[in-house]
Amino acid sequence: MLRSGAGEGASMLFMKYGVHGEGHGHFDKLHFSFFENGREVIPDYGFSRWINIEPKFGGRYLPENDSYAMQTIAHNTVVVDGRTQNGGVERAAEAMSGKRHFFEAGDANVQAMSARADGYSPGVNMQRTMLLLRDRRLPYPVVVDLVRVTSETARQYDWPVHFRGQMIASNVPYTSASTAQAPLGEGFGYQHLWKEASGTTDSTVKVTWLDGGRFYSVIAAGAPNTELVFARTGASDPNFNLIVEPMVVLRRRATDHVFAAVVEPHGFFNEAQERSVEARPRISGVRVLASDAAGSVVEVTGEGGLRWVVHVNNGTASRSATHVVRSGATSFTFTGNVSVTGLEPPR
């Protein structure tokens, strides 16, 4: 858990990697949630139960708690081949645990945490590293997310982000299912998601929404044939048990892949005053420069000359070791578990 600020204006970033939790456990290794401006901005679904409301299945847990809320796609973590971690089998999940890689919170402007979840999908290893950064050129702390997935064979990787509020804009041309919608899949929770729109791009992906008087944008690194899917809960739900909430999914087919993205809070909206300020993010680009077993290097660019180069250790955790990450003839060298160059701390 990473924190910045205090009071209602505080930011908090949470990532889960530990044990399953028996009957109450969800299949959600390396899930994250983001709290900001007094709100849970990027949530998971939680549980499916209308507590003590007798007309809703006696106030007990609903069938959708098993068919959706516990499934991996109901969380903000990578889903492999459209299947829930451990195949949705509790006994298999109880036999495993994610592993802490490193935690760095000594610098209030550069905080980071990293964990691994290997084998939760057969043959796939996964490492997630998340940073909470403060820069004087940005009014609020931002999240940097790096998820490295590796496999010996090509797989389908889905990187979901759940949100609340109103979708505002995306830079990806998409086709909307405006006259007829179908579920996003047939099982593992996908049957409860309406596929509302989708588009394909090779370039940086931007999605902006409005929640609680503030705008939020996801800016994600481009990769060939990346599909952006807009979805919403509520499919295959004849009794209207599910809370209807939107989400976006970045989908890629690859053997190894790095999902690199920034979550930027920005701007202000007040309907009574008819005021909208900074409805577009200041960060404009995210690019993966290199990634291998030693580390990952990502470039983040934006207004005012902002250019960060984020270096993350993928090898054995060490605050003193020097790491060299290579991409072809280019190499990047850094020391420690995480390094961010180009950051301008708040004054």
Image (tube, grey):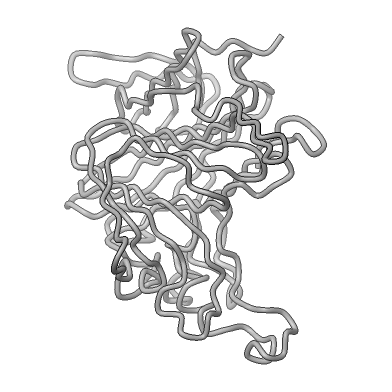
Q: Residue at x 49, y 51 (%)?
A: 30
Task: Decide which of 244, 144 is in the foreground and name it.
Answer: 244
**Residue 22: image location, x then y, percent:** 58, 74
Q: Residue at x 42, y 43 (%)?
A: 127
Q: Residue at x 47, y 39 (%)?
A: 208
**Residue 47: image location, x then y, percent:** 60, 71
Residue farthest right in this picture? 7
Does 149 sit left or right of 34 as displayed? left
Q: Residue at x 32, y 55 (%)?
A: 197
Locate residue 173: give its quadrant. top left
Q: Quadrant of the C terminus?
A: top right
Does 37 sit left or right of 318 as displayed? right
Task: Decide which of 162, 340 is in the foreground and name it.
Answer: 162
Task: Decide which of 154, 185 is in the foreground and name it.
Answer: 185
Locate residue 200: give its quadrant. top left
| Number of numbered callouts drawn | 0
Say above or below: 336 vs 260: above
**Residue 307: image location, x then y, percent:** 45, 13
Does 213 sit left or right of 77 as displayed? right
Q: Quadrant of the N terminus?
A: top right
Say above or below: 236 vs 279: below
Task: Decide which of 323, 332 is in the foreground and name it.
Answer: 332
Does 83 sit left or right of 200 as displayed? right
